């Protein structure tokens, strides 16, 4: 049985405990200068009434720094204990945790909670993730559409020709059975647009499984095998009991539950970050909630965000 998280732990409400916890995660081998990389006796901890806690000085480049430099937490004025608690809530919530819920739990403004969660979603993303699948592995691929139904809108706001996936945000996911998940927002789902994504993120030595959509046959011919199920005819598992896309559809079901029941609305600009959040939880599903939160916070390193990216 996985160990339960103790929310009375000082790391969730005491700044010194939260700082020590985060320093241990981001500096597992001790303080390291983010500019020149030196460690050990070349680093000194600065102390004094005029200094904020957790500041170190590098004897080589003569610059002060803390563990937040170069992370999504850099230049944030949000207390560290709130960062740790927000990460725990995100890691523990299978269908997501909204910023409105978070600001009530933390006692902050909504904008602060929104700020925290989007930076933690950035920490959840793995830019170095390699392709899934491989020889003998099965990779399922499918697409879904996120957005409100025209029939549910007020009559004056309905747009003609927006039935089905029209007017919605398209999401494509690749899921390796008993393996990892990769989800992407693809603005226009066609065979030509989808092929670069699939061959980059899934090994072509894999057995690819899709539905009967016309966008997959040409791509599937590049994989070791390509199996299909005909959803239009009501077929969800082929006669062999092996060919299906139920795994990837289960991943979509969780995302949809998160959208409908937790977030209610997601903007296209931030959709990739929400997908990264759901992928992160799917790829760490065998961890305990505490282990997942620890990994999420450790992912903050090297991902500083700017309002305007430097040239």
Image (cartoon, rainbow, N blue to C red):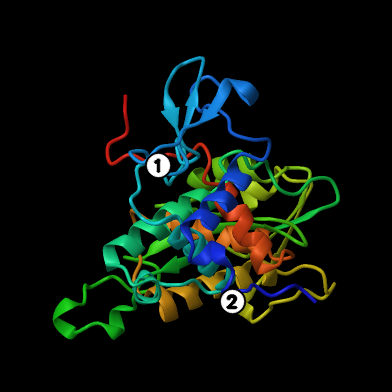
Q: Are marks 1 and 2 in contact (CB under 8 Å)?
A: no
**Location of residue 150 by image quarter:** bottom left
Q: Is label 2 in a helix, a strand or a loop?
A: helix
Task: Determine the CA span between mark 1 and mark 2.
Answer: 50 Å
Q: Residue furthest left?
A: 156
Q: Is residue 177 left or right of residue 38?
A: right
* Residue 213 higher or lower than 93, as above or below: above
**Which is more toward the observer, 43 or 254?**
43
Query: From the image, which quarter does the N terminus lie in?
Result: bottom right
Q: Would you say residue 182 is visible in this rendering? A: no
Q: Is residue 302 left or right of residue 148?
A: right
Circle 2 crowding by C-alpha within 10 Å: few under 14, some 14–19, many from 20? few
Q: Which residue is mark 1?
A: 74
* Residue 186 higher or lower than 199, as above or below: below
Residue 213, image x, y percentages: 57, 62
Q: Which residue is mark 2?
A: 232
Query: From the image, which quarter does the C terminus lie in?
Result: top left
**Location of residue 271 by image quarter:** bottom left
**Location of residue 237 by image quarter:** bottom right
Q: Is label 1 in a helix, a strand or a loop?
A: loop
Circle 1 crowding by C-alpha within 10 Å: few under 14, some 14–19, many from 20? some
Identified at 42% across, 60% down, the residue is 117
**Which is more toward the observer, 157 or 90?**
90
Identified at 46% across, 72% down, the residue is 97
**Which is more toward the observer, 99 or 107?**
107
Residue 175, image x, y percentages: 67, 59
Residue 210, image x, y percentages: 66, 62
Which of the two discs, 1 and 2, labels the residue nearer the N terminus? 1
**Which is more toward the observer, 10 or 130?**
10
Q: Residue furthest top?
A: 60
């Amino acid at each position: 049985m996985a160990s339960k998280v103790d929310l009375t732990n000082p790391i969730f409400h005491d700044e010194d405990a939260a700082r020590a916890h985060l320093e241990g995660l981001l500096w597992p081998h001790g303080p390291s200068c983010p500019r020149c990389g030196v460690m050990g006796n070349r680093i000194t901890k600065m102390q004094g009434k005029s200094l904020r806690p957790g500041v170190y000085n590098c004897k080589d480049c003569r610059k002060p720094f803390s563990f937040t430099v170069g992370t999504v937490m850099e230049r944030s004025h949000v207390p560290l204990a709130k960062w740790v608690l927000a990460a725990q809530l995100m890691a523990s919530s299978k269908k997501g945790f909204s910023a409105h819920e978070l600001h009530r739990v933390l006692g902050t403004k909504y904008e602060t909670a929104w700020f925290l969660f989007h930076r933690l979603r950035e920490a959840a993303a793995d830019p170095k993730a390699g392709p899934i699948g491989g020889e003998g592995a099965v990779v399922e691929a499918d697409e879904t559409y996120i957005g409100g139904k025209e029939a549910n809108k007020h009559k004056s706001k309905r747009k003609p020709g927006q039935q089905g996936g029209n007017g919605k945000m398209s999401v494509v996911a690749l899921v390796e059975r008993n393996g990892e998940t990769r989800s992407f927002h693809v603005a226009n789902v066609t065979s030509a647009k989808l092929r670069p994504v699939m061959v980059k993120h899934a090994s072509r030595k894999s057995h690819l499984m899709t539905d009967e959509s016309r966008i997959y046959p040409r791509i599937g011919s590049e994989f070791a095998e390509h199996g299909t199920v005909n959803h239009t005819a009501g077929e969800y598992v082929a006669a062999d009991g092996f060919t299906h896309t139920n795994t990837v559809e289960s991943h979509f079901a969780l995302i949809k539950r998160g959208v409908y029941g937790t977030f209610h609305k997601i903007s296209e600009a931030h959709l990739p970050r929400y997908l990264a959040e759901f992928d992160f939880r799917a790829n760490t599903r065998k961890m305990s909630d505490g282990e997942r939160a620890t990994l999420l916070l450790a992912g903050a390193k090297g991902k500083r965000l700017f309002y305007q990216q430097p040239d």
